[in-house]
Image (cartoon, rainbow, N blue to C red):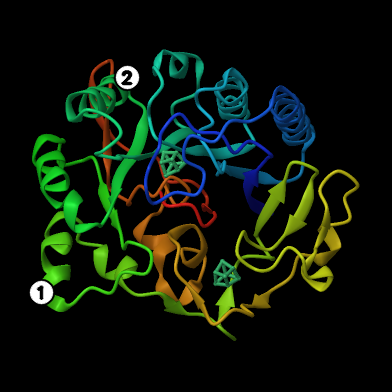
Amino acid sequence: MELSILYRGPLASCDYDCGYCPFAKRRDSPETLRADRAALERFVAWVIAQSEDQINVLFTPWGEGLTRSWYQRALVELSRLDHVGEVAIQTNLSSRTAWTAGADLDSLALWCTYHPDQVSYERFLGRCHELRDSGVRFSTGIVGLPEHLDAARRLRADLPDDVYLWVNAAEGHTYTDEEAEPWAEIDPLFPVSRFPHASQGHACRAGESVISVDGDGEVYRCHFVSRTEPTERLGNLYDGSYRQALRARLCPLTQCDCHIGYVHMPELGLYDTFAGGVLARIPAGATVLRPEPVLKPVPLLKSAGAAGTRPR
Ligand code: SF4
Ligand code: SF4
């Protein structure tokens, strides 16, 4: 089977200080960092040891993972496995990108969020160009706050057409048609993000072919359904108990308002829209300029799969 895993360990520190994020400038203790590293290494070892499944992984740390060497190593290592289709991470792209040179670029992908009040425009755009020049697949995006509109327009204009720039509806923000229009001009898929999706009783791949895993290997269907509700626990990754719980399920929540959740609702057809890049939010047909250089289509994965409540 093909299994997509959203992994989130204990790490919650970030080098940025976004006003809209509860994890801004949080520091992790040395103990937490050691625990996060050990948990991640255990997870990578588990993926390496799998022989039956095609596995896709999206790292969705509460904070910023790529400032930590162990996330870079994990991405490189997993990308090189034949049975890993896509391995991706949500990042603010504050770190250097040279580490990607060791990765299999057919599998590696990055979800890069631009936070205009945290990083200079030139630095963020420069990092995007580094990735593209290196042949790394990525999407980039921004939170659709009114004060971000000019920066989003500028970034859209300066990025190559084949780099997708998504816009996330800002949490708690309702957009009139007039307010939504400029965002949809930047991101034609903004209508998908604009409103939460009614999900209660609707089919979702979460809990069947998509799971959420924490640092202890505890498995839940997604990052959103309560982790304090014992009946929602699917089991543990490391003792294999999750396996027998995988089955078709209906969502118990009223609505799903995050891409990493609703992308797995079959009724939305987003596996087709993002074929080959569901985890990193890269639409089908996006192209990547490889260093050779040749312009070649992003290879389609056999499927895909892409957490959380922090603003991305
Ligand atoms: S939104 Fe992302 S980049 Fe900004 S503080 Fe939170 S974790 Fe860091
Ligand atoms: S629709 Fe969203 S909240 Fe519901 S099970 Fe799927 S991912 Fe989780």
In the rendered structure, find residue 134 and report the number of the disc placed on it: 2
Tag 2's secondary structure? Answer: loop
The quarter of the image holding the N terminus is: bottom right
The image shows residue 247 at horizontal and vertical percentages of: 74, 70
Left or right placement of residue 128 versus residue 204 in this view: left
Q: Are marks 2 and 1 in contact (CB under 8 Å)?
A: no
Amino acid type, callout 2: Ser
Residue at 27 percent of width and 26 percent of height: 132
Among the 4 quarters of the image, the one containing residue 44 = top right
Residue at 30 percent of width and 40 percent of height: 115
Residue at 77 percent of width and 38 percent of height: 51
On screen, residue 61 above or below 127 = below
**Outermost residue, bottom direction?**
201
Mark 1 highlights which residue? Answer: 178
The image shows residue 237 at horizontal and vertical percentages of: 81, 48
On screen, residue 304 above or below 269 = above
Tag 1's secondary structure? Answer: helix
Left or right placement of residue 165 versus residue 149 in this view: right
